[in-house]
Image (spheres, rainbow, N blue to C red):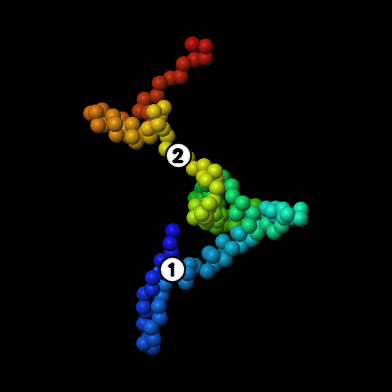
Amino acid sequence: MSIDTSEVRVTGASGASKGQKGARFDLIPPLQLKKLAVHYGLGARKYPGIERQDGQPGPAIDNWRLGFNYSSSIAALERHFNLWKSGEDFDEETGSNHLVAVMWHCMTLLEYQDTPGFPAAYDDRQQPLVNSLGATVEEVRAAIAAYGGSLPTSPIPTKLEPLPKLGE
């Protein structure tokens, strides 16, 4: 990903011109950015440092950079968002607003995604369901439709059959 470095010339009230870049850090709310920085600091205190080559514990500042499965971050992100959505604003353990934790996980996932050479093994996002032939559900649906048939678009069955009793 490349960052927009193009400039737009802005003329002030005095008539002076100044170039303005496409990346507008001045538009990021400073208080929310500070809350995110505090959350990073909480994590640095919570998680152990990386052992140095001399056997001594190193700083915990970049512990998250060692990487972990995307699914772990996604699960935590969704948990924090659902708690916030249900009316709980602050995490009891950290004191951070749940939305700050959501931002942290989004930033972490973006960093993992944008870091060249970051281990692909951590990217365990769910892949589209495939059948035994290797086709996705959408591909199967398209093939059936091409032959005049159709598949229900809803994954929810319209009629539930009773389960057989044990031993039958």
Q: In the image, what residue occupies the spot 52% across and 55% down?
A: 115
Q: Is residue 130 above or below residue 44?
A: above
Per the model, the C-alpha gap separating discs 1 and 2 is 33 Å
Q: Is residue 77 above or below residue 2?
A: above
Which of the two labelled residues, at mark 1 and mark 2, occupies the earlier sequence position? 1
What residue type is disc 2 on? Answer: Gln
Helix or strand or loop: what does disc 1 sit on? Answer: loop
Q: In the image, what residue occupies the spot 64% across and 54% down?
A: 63
59 relative position to 75: left or right: right
What residue type is disc 1 on? Answer: Ala
Point out the residue furthest to the left here: 148
Residue position marked by numbered label 2 in the rendering: 127
Where is the N terminus found, in terms of image quarters?
Answer: bottom left
Residue 107 at what x, y percent from top left?
A: 52, 56
Q: Residues within 10 Å of mark 2 (few under 14, many from 20)?
A: few
106 relative position to 154: left or right: right
Residue 57 at what x, y percent from top left?
A: 74, 55
Q: Quadrant of residue 2?
A: bottom left
Q: In the image, what residue occupies the spot 69% across and 59% down?
A: 59
Point out the residue furthest to the bottom here: 14
Q: From this viewpoint, is residue 110 visible?
A: no
Question: Can you tell which mark lies on residue 123?
Answer: none
Q: Is residue 102 above or below residue 33?
A: above
Residue 126 at what x, y percent from top left?
A: 47, 40
In front of the other: 88 or 165: 165
In front of the other: 93 or 111: 111
Helix or strand or loop: what does disc 2 sit on? Answer: loop
Residue 8 at what x, y percent from top left?
A: 36, 75
Point out the residue furthest to the top here: 168
Determine contact: label 1, label 2, CB under 8 Å. Answer: no
Residue position marked by numbered label 1 in the rendering: 23
